[in-house]
Image (cartoon, grey):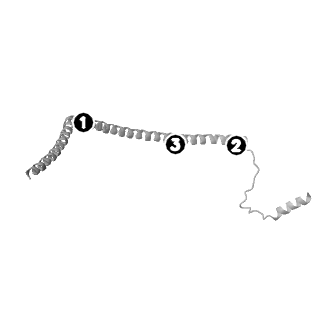
Amino acid sequence: MAVAAQGVQATRHEEPPPDEAAVERAEEAKEPAEADITELCWDMFPKMASYLTGELTDITRATSEDYKLLENMNKLTSLKYLEMKYIAINISRYLKDLNQKYAELQPCLDQINVTEEQVAALEQAAYKLDAYSKKLEAKYKKLEK
């Protein structure tokens, strides 16, 4: 054991001494006197109150600014929705007008459809008549010979 202690001591002596400027010296902690603690408390409480008051003021100011920002955003959003409402009302009005005009034109459109069907039937009749006239012409030429 004595050999081990000598080895440890030898190891300690081999280390280079630390730079004294870089090493802080430890001092024994002493409890301040009761009067010092009281004085420090009296000094701390107003400073703590001032700090907390400042923090609460900052929080209140930030909260107030947040509420003002939200209020402005709500006003702008309300205006946008009001604008969109008027646009929707105008679109609805134009759609009703368009539907009314379409309803007024519907009889004319129906008449156009009927006329188109009649023209198609007349065209078919004309093709049949043309084919029949060609047959008659062919028979007439045959009879003429």
Indicate whether 1 appears above or below 91: below
**How far from the left and from the top, in percent, is residue 30?**
75, 47
Please name whichever residue, 108 or 21, is drawn nearer the observer in this view of the structure.
Answer: 108
Tag 1: residue type?
Asp
Task: Say the numbered circle drawn on residue 36.
Answer: 2
Callout 2 secondary element:
helix
Q: Which numbered disc, 1 or 2, marks the residue that appears first in the sequence?
A: 2
Relative horizontal placement of residue 83, taking residue 66 as reference (left or right): left
The amino acid type of the residue labelled 2 equals Asp
**In percent of the image, x 10 and y 51: which residue is there?**
141
Q: Which residue is mark 1?
A: 97
Q: Characterize the local packing of mark 3: few (<14), some (14-19) or many (20 or more) Cα atoms within 10 angstroms.
A: few
Does the residue at mark 2 contact the one at mark 3 (Cβ under 8 Å)? no
Q: Residues within 10 Å of mark 2 (few under 14, many from 20)?
A: few
Q: Tell me if mark 1 has few (under 14), some (14-19) or many (20+) residues whose alpha carbon lies within 10 angstroms of its own.
A: few
Q: Secondary structure at mark 3?
A: helix
Marks 1 and 2, how far apart at CA = 90 Å
Which one is nearer the viewer's eye here, 17 or 70?
Answer: 70
Relative to 96, 15 lies left or right: right
In the drawing, does residue 43 fall left or right of residue 32?
left
Asked if labels 2 and 1 touch by Cβ distance under 8 angstroms, the answer is: no
Residue 60 coordinates in the image, percent (x, y): 50, 39
Specify whether 145 is left or right of 42: left
Q: Residue furthest left?
A: 144
Residue at (60% x, 41% y) in the render: 48
Residue 127: x %, y % from top left: 17, 46
**On the image, numbered disc 3 is attached to which residue?**
58
Q: Quadrant of the N terminus?
A: bottom right
Q: Which residue is pictured at 31% across the width and 37% down the height?
A: 86
Mark in the foreground, 1 or 2: 1
Residue drawn at point x = 70 percent, y = 43 percent: 36
